[in-house]
Image: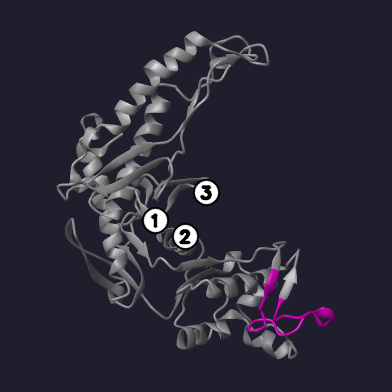
Amino acid sequence: MSLAHTEFPVDAFSSEVRRVALADYVSRVAAQCIRERHMNETLSTEGGGGGWSGPKGGTFNINVPGQEVLPRTSTVINISPSKSGELAGTIELRFTASLPARGRTILGLEASKILSLNLPWLAERSLLWSSQKQQDLIQHIRVVEDQEALRGQLEGQDLVAFVANEAILPRKSGASDLPMSTGSVTRFVSPPDMETELARPNGAPIRGMGISRGVTVLTGGGFHGKSTLLEALELSIYNHVPEDGRDRVVTESKCVKIRAEDGRSVTGVDISPFISGLPRGKDTKAFSSTDASGSTSMAANIQEALELGASSILIDEDSSATNLLIRDQRMQALVTNETITPLVSKARALFDELGVSTIIVVGGCGDCAF
């Protein structure tokens, strides 16, 4: 459908970040419309028992976005300048619609309803400006644009990440990426000595915690939110929807979360900066394994991230190989011929020599010497 026909204002798709936000919003509207009209339910739910001889199909399906706002193939906006110099183009809504059938026979009457009633209704509700909750759409675009602007200021401020005051970092549950309900949540407040201010194109400047480049250690007691904060930083390389709680948290785009992955396959990775020797003289300069251990998999993950140009890495001791992460003074005295160099001994060198920052969560050892 042409953008002119949709009547979306030009400001809604005048930049790349706005086009991504608009496309994301349209996909969410389409997914909601499909659910509300039960167009995602197969004919077998109406009776007939399903099976080979029963009625089936007739469903609409579309990629349902999560809390992150990303370029997607479910809605695609193609821009081309018009003869007058104004932006013009098309918008495509992509989804699947299975024809209803009984056995190998298409049910013509039901199919005609899908193609002549449901399909036009879905296109009208999703793609026309007049059908939208217009203020919600404008707010969606502005919030996404603000996050992109905040992220763009990190390098100039020598920051890895920014967490705004009043952000909601905890999630509803371990199986949900929705924010915890506001009645039971503790909102984030920056330590005074780390508080900074960033500008937004669609609102007043915003204050919060700026995490400087270098080595940052997050520590505290159990259930104090260390891993929750790290997870928020991990996912804030992406923009988030309004009211997500993380929609004012941004991390530089080349940040990578590192963890141990027992059993992963590794091929030809130089892990010698961390592991200098393996049983049977196995080469660590071009390490390969179909079943890597915790320490070798974590070393490989770090090296692969560096090779791909990571500018910062995130480490949580809960998901790390302890022997690659840290060795306290007593273990250093007890084991004198250790072939593993722990990350805590390399973190400062990673920043000084390669400019790669480290944010690490620790709670079980106080002998970290960065």
Task: Mark 3: give few (<14), some (14-19) or many (20+) Cα within 10 Å.
Answer: few
* Structural crowding at the residue carrying mark 1, measured as other residues with C-alpha within 10 Å and reported as few (<14), some (14–19) or many (≥20): many
Disc nearer the start of the sequence (1/3): 1
Rendered image: mark on residue 169: 1
Image spot of residue 38 (x, y percent): 44, 22
The residue depicted at 24 percent of the width and 40 percent of the height is 136
Along the line of sight, the residue nearer the viewer: 1 or 7: 1
Label 1 close to label 2 by CB (< 8 Å)? yes
- Kindly indicate whether the residue at mark 2 contacts the one at mark 3 (C-beta within 8 angstroms): no
**Disc 2 packing (10 Å; few <14; some 14–19; many ≥20):** some
Check disc 2 and report the residue beneath it. Answer: 231
Q: Which residues are magenta?
A: 267-286
| Nearer mark to the viewer, of 3 and 2 | 2
Q: Which mark is residue 174?
A: 3
Q: Is residue 108 above or below residue 281?
A: above
Q: Is residue 113 above or below residue 289?
A: above
Report how far apart the C-alphas of labels 1 and 2 lie in the structure: 9 Å
Is there any visible trace of residue 242 in the rendered image?
Answer: no
Instruction: Identify the residue at image location x=46%, y=38%.
Output: 63
Please name which of the two marks, 1 or 2, marks the residue nearer to the observer: 2
